[in-house]
Amino acid sequence: MTLFEELQWRGMVSESTEGVRETLSSERVTAYIGFDPTASSLHIGNLLTVMGLARLQKFGHTPIAIVGGGTGMIGDPSGKSQERNLLSAEQIALNVTGVRAQLERFLDFNAPENAATIVNNADWLGAIDLLSYLRDVGKHFTVNYMLQKESVSRRIESADGISYTEFSYLILQAYDFLQLFDRRHCTLQMGGTDQWGNITAGIELIRRVRGKKAHGLVWPLLKTAAGTKFGKTEAGTVWLDPQRTSERDFYQFWLQTDDRDVINYLNVFTWLEQPEIERLSRGVEADPAGRGAQRRLADEVTRMVHGDNALAQAQGDAALRFGGALTAESLQGVVASASVSASKIAAGMATTELVLIAGLAKSKSEAFRLIEQGGVTINDVAVTDPRALVSLDQALGNRFKVSRGRRGVAIVEITGA
């Protein structure tokens, strides 16, 4: 199977230039994808793009990741309904560093024949002067051509329009492709369908300036079966950085995937092969309540992003939340979310205060009402008296599992003698 065929069965080919299928099967290609440094961490919406580069490398091709320190100062209008807030050069530099570190988890930068590289387009965009840019690059693009691009035409039709700053983004990205073509013999750019206009502009620039052929390949933008944007939750964006989204919450996001979406996510976000995904698909149809495909998805993606130790902790947490055996050993396998001193408990601490410390209530009065309503358990034992005191004898080892309903769960660690 060639890379093109692999991407095709995984549903990762929306549009491609003529000849790209044959090129990927007959040549070792150098290809690139750009990452916009609008934050110091990638999020799961970027993960599809990262997997595109990783699959490219797996099939023997050479991946380049551009972290847009230059274009990031302009802002990509693609898929945006209004102008972005421009970041400072200092903030972009910090974001570039964070994104670069995360990409290194997915790509092999020491492969003997097709090592991945990361470049910052500020290296060339920051050096070009305005007159050279207008004369050598801008003259190859008519305004009519640029107005035909969806990313531009959509914004022109919006109430706020588009500034000259963002209008010029398309040409800057085309210049990126030309620079990588010259510097690294890069002949393919990949990305989501929202980048098709930018990609074809780069292909056109290479044709006009160098008289050579370059290629583009894009995949569909992900939406959930419910029609919402992938990666957005009630709590906000799901980040790859565990300081922004905990490993537990990251795991839970994938575990809660809709049955209608899970097979597509297994295709694009994991390395599982087609027969295994087809087996999991049959399981969804035969036993949807078992959620075997969701568990496999959560396991595979969490291991890939956060590692085996984080996966084990997230699995332990999920088991405690959804009916796993509760023992002192199982509690030790889960990261505590709060702590309380043994001396404070020994001095006489109300159960309502433990609920408050666990973060399951905003006040003692709210905790009091929750206990009255039968909504609180400690180590899976119902608490019936809101005036009761916490006892060290209730602990399993040095921990409490405090639950509010089924999904509100916290592990409180006892510290000190």
Image (cartoon, helix red, strand yellow):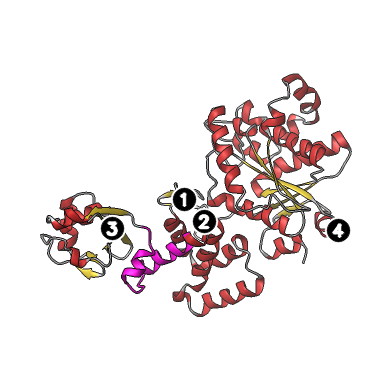
Give the left or right position of residue 346, taking residue 250 as reference: left
For badge 4, the amino acid type reads Ser
Residue at the disc numbered 1 = 242
**Helix, strand or loop at mark 2:** helix
Write the residue at 46% across / 60% down.
Answer: 251
Residue at the disc numbered 3 = 412
Residue at the disc numbered 2 = 306
For badge 1, the amino acid type reads Pro
Residue at the disc numbered 4 = 26
In this view, the residue in front, 310 or 24, is 310
Quarter the C terminus occupies: bottom left
Residue 76 location in percent, x, y?
Answer: 61, 36
Give the left or right position of residue 89, taking residue 186 as reference: left
**Helix, strand or loop at mark 1:** loop
Residue 383 figure quarter: bottom left
N-terminal of the two: label 3 or label 2? 2
Q: Are marks 2 and 4 in contact (CB under 8 Å)?
A: no
Q: Are marks 1 and 2 in contact (CB under 8 Å)?
A: yes
The magenta stretch is 310-335
**Mark 1 to mark 2 CA distance (whole Å):** 8 Å
N-terminal of the two: label 4 or label 3? 4
For badge 3, the amino acid type reads Val
**Residue at far front of view:** 417
N-terminal of the two: label 2 or label 4? 4
**Mark 1 to mark 4 CA distance (whole Å):** 40 Å
Q: Are marks 4 and 3 in contact (CB under 8 Å)?
A: no
Residue 291 visible to the viewer: yes
